Amino acid sequence: MAKKTRAQSRQKRHKRVRGKVSGTSARPRLNVFRSLSSIYAQLIDDTAGRTLLSASSIDGELRTSLKGKNKTEQLPNAPRPRALSKSSWTAAVSATQGASKRWQRARAKKAWNSRQNCLSSSEH
């Protein structure tokens, strides 16, 4: 079976979401498409079958205001990614390692028990 392309995967996701989400004039559906170089957004009224509003990073007015800015500067109200402090990073790593070690111990114990059961059943 051939591997799905990125476009085929996107179409499948789109179809699944569109089966569950529809827009009305009171509460329109927001559709966002992001390419490598641009972003497009639409507010859509599905009951009337029309686009109420559309915007794009390639629109002339918006393009001039974004020119020369990097992506984090383009969205001034967007939350900035915050760096993890050393203590929270250590806690996250420890929790992950602890869960992994517990899982490994449980798996080894299960294997040991099944081996013991096989040995005890062959003795009888």
Image (cartoon, grey):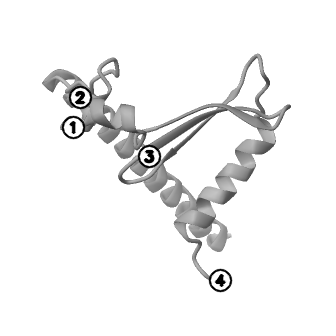
**Residue at 19% over, 27% down:** 83
Q: Which mark is on residue 103? A: 3
Amino acid carrying mark 4 in the image: Met
How many angstroms separate mark 2 from mark 4 (CA)?
44 Å
Give yes or no for contact between labels 1 and 2 (Cβ–Cβ under 8 Å). Answer: yes
Q: Is residue 95 left or right of residue 117?
A: left
Disc 4/disc 1 C-alpha distance (Å): 41 Å
Q: CA distance from mark 2 to mark 3?
A: 44 Å
In the image, residue 31 sits, relative to residue 15, either above or below, namely: above
Furthest-right residue in view?
47
Which badge, 4 or 3, comes first in the chain's sequence? 4
Please say whether residue 94 is visible from this viewpoint. no
First reached walking from the N terminus: tag 4 or tag 1:
4
Q: Are marks 3 and 1 in contact (CB under 8 Å)?
A: no
Rendering coords of residue 91 (x, y %): 25, 26
Measuring from the top left, give residue 79's x and y in whole percent.
33, 21
| Residue where numbered disc 4 is placed | 1
Numbered circle sitting on residue 84: none
Q: Which element type, helix, strand or loop, lies under badge 3?
A: helix
Q: Which mark is residue 70?
A: 1
Q: Give amino acid for label 2.
A: Glu
Report the amino acid beneath label 3. Answer: Trp
Q: Earlier in the sequence, mark 2 or mark 4?
A: 4
